Amino acid sequence: MIASAYAATAEHAAAGSGMPQFEPSVFQHQIVWSIASFFVLLYLLKKYVLPPIEKILDERGGKIRSDLEAAEKSRLEADKIRQDVQRQLAAARRLAEQTVEEARLEAAKYRDLARESLTQELAKKKSVALAEIDAAKRAAVAELHDAVVDIAMLATEKLIAKSMNKNDVSKVVQEAVTAIQANPGKLQ
Amino acid sequence: MDATAAALIGMGLAALGFAGSGVGLGVLFGKAIEAIARQPAAEAQLAKYIWIGMAFVEAVALYGLVVAFIIMGKA
Amino acid sequence: MTATAPVVAAAAPKMDPLHHFHVTKYLDFDYLGIDVAISNSVLWMWIAAGLVLLFFHLAFKNPRIVPGRLQSLGEAGYLFIRGIVDDIVGEKGRPFFPYIFTLFFFILFCNLAGLIPGSFTVTSQLIVTATFSLTIVGFSFAYGFYLHGTHYFKFFVPTGVPVLLMPLMIPIEIISFLARPVSLAVRLFANMTAGHTMLAVMFLYVVTLPWWGAWVPFGFTVIFTGVEIFIGFIQAYIFTILTCVYINDSIHMH
């Protein structure tokens, strides 16, 4: 530019001091070539430049879209997994509660059972004891009865041996009856 | 006055057109700054119109320059 | 004018900041009466187009899902134009996307390639920008006519205006329509020309001033080159946006 600013020669001075742009002799070829250059450039850009740009932009758009979709899908999946885990957790909790409840119930059952068996045993033991007491009483009564009979027989033998008369017998019987009446429980 | 001198005066007068462009640029950027001060969020949107407007306003001054050059050719 | 030129100025190189806009024909060709010469303008058109292709070739040499630096830039460029087309024209603008994409990158790389020292700025040629703008506006008109038939002439009749004002409004609408290609072409051409002229003037000061003064314009050129990169981008953007607006007008009318 420096050089061109310098180089004002006579040749250009002769061509006129106006703007070189208004020199009509250089118009035609510039019109032709600017249109030609434009369309050649257009053809080349359209053929070799625009398709790869559009391709890469579409690709990127597609990739972004697919990435977004994948992210959405994995989000949904994570959601599902989370729900699954929650469900499993809830199930486990329920199971644990159930187990605890069952254990509690079983323990209660065992306790009741134990109590019942204890009661039963106690009752049995009591009844056995009662029966034993009863039997002992019976045995004692029987023994007493036998003893009374023996005594009576002995007394009778002695009386018979003495050949007792009617008054004597009556007296003995009266005595016996009186004894019995005085203490009736002794015979029972 | 010979024709050359008249042409030179004419060229100088053509350069007066720059005054209009100067006023235009002042108004343009003054208003633009005012608008941005009022609404700083709109700056990016306004900037586009500011540059387009600047190119239009500047072109007016350059028409004057072209006129001056045309006169220069006649001198 | 020349009679009173100071001695210093006479000793200095003659100032011609417009010199680098001269089109020099390298090879003269003639095809069926049409001038198809190869000039520096044409050469730099091809270089810019080649740079566009090179850029996208490098960016998408082995495209990956997770883009590298250059690929990100290429994709950002693609999505940028896609956004413009979708925002302004909408669904019906899809068929025009390759054209607008090519237009933006061709103009952008012409603008940027022009900043290379010793290069030629194709977009600083009015005839080139005019060719583009006339083609675009002509196409949008033809396309609107193709889509809407004679109904398309309603385009020039503003709505909500009293009938009495119609004789005034319709010519204004027609003139504003005809001004479209002119303003579109002149905007790009003037921006590029002005920026490069400014740089040329500053460089001239760099070489004419003594060393202790030269750094001021030199520093200015450094900063201004950055500004020029920005302007090159903005102008390509504006050109593209207006193209979309014109196409949208012919599709949807207003």
Image (tube, coloured by chain):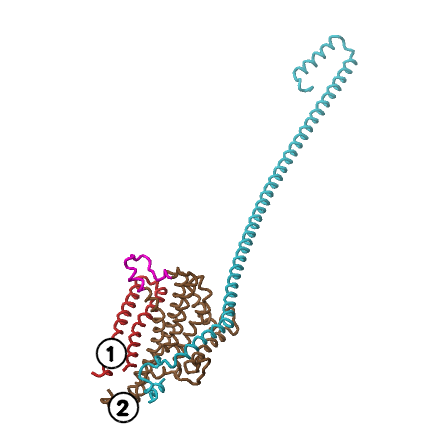
Chain colours: A cyan, B red, C brown
User: Which residue has dot 1 on it?
Assistant: B10
Region of the chain picked out in magenta, as a range: C153-172
In terms of secondary structure, where does tag 2 sit?
helix
- Which x, y percent locates residue A150? 75, 20
Q: Magenta span has C154? A: yes
- Which x, y percent locates residue A146? 74, 21
Q: How many marks?
A: 2
Q: Report which quarter residue B50 is drawn in.
A: bottom left
What secondary structure do most residues of the magenta stretch adopt? helix
Mark seen at residue C24: none
User: Which residue has dot 2 on it?
Assistant: C10
Disc 1 is attached to a residue of which chain?
B
- Which x, y percent locates residue B13? 24, 77
- Which x, y percent locates residue C245? 38, 65
Q: For this rendering, which residue is in front, C134 or A159?
A: C134
Compared to B5, does B26 lie above or below?
above
Distance (Cα) linking label 1 and label 2: 24 Å
Compared to C8, does B8 lie above or below?
above
Question: Are tags 1 and 2 found on a single chain?
Answer: no
- Looking at the rendered structure, the kind of residue marked 2 is Ala
Q: Report which quarter residue B40 is drawn in.
A: bottom left
In terms of secondary structure, where does tag 1 sit?
helix
Q: Magenta span has A171? A: no
| Other-residue count near label 1 (Cα within 10 Å), few / some / many at <14 / 14–19 / ≥20 | some
Identify the image quadrant of the N terminus of chain C.
bottom left
